[in-house]
Image (cartoon, rainbow, N blue to C red):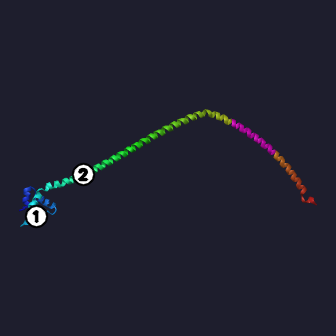
Amino acid sequence: MGKTIRQLSEELKLSKQAINQRINSINGFRSKHTYKVKNHLEIDNQGVKMLANFGKQKRQDRQPNQQDKNDKIDKIDHILLKQLDVKDQQIANLQQALDQQQKLQIATVTENHRLKEHIRKLSGLLEPSSATQQQQSNDKDDTLSNSINAIHDNAENDKQDQSHIVDEKKKRIHKNKVNKSWWHFW
């Protein structure tokens, strides 16, 4: 013999609505475990046991689900930890590269300062010798001016010689023209 929803609610100390919710939440419960007697809906003994153990059953169903969720969370945690390790390694490599870059930059700046100082020292050595260079330059200018004057004198002499030669040639040509004129042949 089965029990009605009212009897079951008094026995389980639940409201009729809670019993109906449990009945509706179990798939196929009405078709398998309920039958109608006059105006009442009765639940067979197996259905009563199912409804009585509904909370326990739900907890047992939830435990494997919870275990699966915990397993998934553990896997995700493991994956995230691996990713963090990889990122930590990448950060360490980048930090090392940055340190090397900074050391090279410092070495370059130091070398530049050293070279500038060396150039200053060399320019200090060149300044006293610049007076010597000035003297040499003056000597060269004197030599050049003397050479230019000599060349100029030679050029004037050559010019005079050439003008004398040109004058003589003109005289000869004029003399020849006079003799070769056409009226002289008659």
Chief SS of the magenta region = helix
Residue under label 2:
71
The residue to which callout 1 is attached is 34
User: 172 and 32: which one is in front?
Assistant: 32
Q: Secondary structure at mark 2?
A: helix
Front one among 98 and 76:
76
- Whether the residues at callouts 2 and 1 have beta carbons within 8 Å, the answer is no
Does the magenta segment cover residue 12?
A: no
Mark with earlier residue (2, 1)? 1
* Left or right of 144, for residue 38: left
Q: Is residue 132 above or below residue 40?
A: above
Location of residue 157 (image quadrant): top right
Q: Image quadrant for the N terminus?
A: bottom left
Q: Which residues are magenta?
A: 139-160
> What residue type is disc 2 on?
Asp
- 129 on left or right of 87: right
- x and y, in percent, of residue 29 in the image: 14, 62
